[in-house]
Image: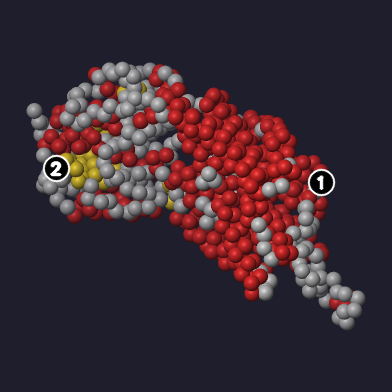
Amino acid sequence: MTPRYHPGFRPDIEGLRAAAVLAVLGFHATVPGMAGGFVGVDVFFVISGFLITGLLLRDITAAGRFSLAEFYARRARRLLPAAGVVLLATITGAWALLPPLRGGDIAGDVIAAALSIANWRFVAGQTDYLAAEHDPSPLLHYWSLAVEEQFYLLWAPLLLVLALLARRLGRSAVPAIAVAVVVLTCASFGLSRWWTDLSQPLAYLASPSRAWQFGAGALAALLMPYASRPHSPSPSDPGRDARRDGRRPRLVTRALLAALGLAGAAAIVWAVAAFDSETRYPGTAALVPTLGAVAVILFRSPVSAALSLPPIRVLGRLSFSWYLWHWPVLVLAEAALGPQTWPVRLALVLASAAPAALTTTLVENPLRLSAVVTALPRRGLALGTTAMTVPVAAALLLNGGAVQGAAVTRATVADAPATGPAAAPVAGLQPPPAQARTDFPRSNGCEIALTATTSPPCRFGVPAAEDRIVLIGDSHAGQWFAAAERIAVRRGWALEVLTKPGCPLPRLTVVDQRLGREYRECDTWREYALDRLAAGPPPRLILIASLNAYATDRAALTRAWDSTLDRLTRLGAPLVYLRDTPLPGEDVPVCLSGRPAGDCAFPRRRGLRPDPLAEQIAAGERPGVRLLDLTPLLCPGTAGTCPAALDGIVLYRDGVHITDTLAVRLAPRIEQDLEDLDLIPTVL
């Protein structure tokens, strides 16, 4: 008898969908006790792998093949119309509620979501240091849809090839498919563990490291005919009475099946309650909700009955559209109203059920079940294409409006006046907000990659000169490249740049949020950089800077600086600490793209953090180290706010770095201060 790989409609799985979406909603609403609600997506992946592979197995065992066109048409009818409606609504909401530059970001997200590559766009955003300060996208949750579509783009053709080969050989395709599922699942799980240690955002968002969860669902589909019920001996079986007398059935008893189902449900609940942002995820931890979902699907239990209750199933039918709507509603509402407490966030995600219900009733179900659309695969594919084309067109329109503006006018080192930003009023903002985001130091890649542990030569000015300046630190040192370059060029010196983003110059071990783990490469690079300086000739001047936000423990920060400064002072060169610049804490170009500059000022208390090293140098407690403090220029006076722009110059390219335009403008001032301190020779 041919196993029945797809038993038809399962009300408990519809209820499991409801549980999964409620977990995600609770997590995004920051409901206490649901910090691990992100595992609801894992449950969705398992359900998808189970249902889709089960459908394909049904067709393969019945006919020896299936239609790829019909498969993709069915997915297009099921997913794309609702997804397109939410994309269109989101881009419209962004246009109405957000600053133009922010809307331009979201336009790019819409295009990526429509092309089912949103996960890779967000991987780049999560791991790209230059994008790390941007606000969350209202389409971030589309990463999971992209992962799913990428999986089935390869999975369905693979199964079809195996089915056709088996058919030609006159064999069942199921064993070959089972082997493929096991191999794929194991390989993907191994990759997930490796990438979680290497780069957690990559492991979390990438399809290769998530494919094993669809594979787990596929394994459940393969096992379903054998695990759904204990073996029942036939009346003619001679061993029937012996088994009645105490031997267990060939598989397991119904009681044990129910216990396994209950254990699976408990595993999911435990993960929702116990996991949080500190959990190394996905990695091995993802086994808990994944295997839990497999157990709930395979083994009927009282949980199955609870999930089959009509009210739960109503939420399950709504789950896809609700998942699509809840995050844009939450993000756009907070963009308009500011950050909210968890009860308000919960109210917002619950309110998103209203547009979700309308989408399900008016769009998703009518088009999915339409006799006209389902009659031919090409109609379903055309429907899906149209559903994605409309929001993409709207996104292109929005993006075109967001990036309009005059080209940036860049000052050169030689032309910069020897004053601060107030001395050069200009018409409009320079650089314009759209260009300010990319107004980086022109150090040609010397801010090395996150995973790099050594730096290239990175010599500027007069590279072959014996005398040189060293600029060392993180990106907050790198932002002063223009000033260091001016000093070197005007004296015929070389400039050596040693910078690594997110890596504190004081000897601190930190966790990098972009990698989602301890920043081991930073510790290695710091020792490399100090050793490289010690091995070379003494420089004429060492400029150091570092983000002043790596540690809040003054004593620990002081000890960390002790170690680094001790090695630098032994080099015998003048050592100058450039106090960290104010930290706006928000994306300044985005704010300036939609509001007057005065409205983008930020609180002085927030922007000017206590700086123990600067205080010690000013008090004479750090012999051999001099201080340059440009805070009075960047946050003048004693008012309660610091400006985002001064006299037409945009001061910050994001929420933590100054623009290169500002650095160029301040370069003469820094040079003059160093001359006044007799640290460099005066050049007329």
Q: Which residue is painted at 77% across and 69% down in the image? A: 2
Q: In which quarter of the image is the C terminus?
A: top left
Residue 316 in the image: x percent, y percent? 73, 44
Q: Residue 87 carries which label?
A: none
Image quadrant assignment for residue 403: top left
In this figure, which residue is indicated by the disc labeled 1? 309
For the residue pair 627 and 235, the one nearer the viewer reads as 235
The answer to which quarter of the image holds residue 546 is: top left
Whether 72 is drawn above or below 95: the answer is below
Residue at horizontal 59 percent and vertical 54 percent from the top: 152
* Colour mapping used in the image: secondary structure
Q: How crowded is mark 1: few (under 14 residues within 10 Å), some or many (20 or more)?
A: some
Q: Can residue 377 be seen in this view?
A: yes
Q: Which amino acid does label 1 sit on?
A: Leu
> Is residue 422 shown above or below 311?
above
337 shown above or below 84? above
- Per the image, label 1 sits on a secondary structure element best described as loop
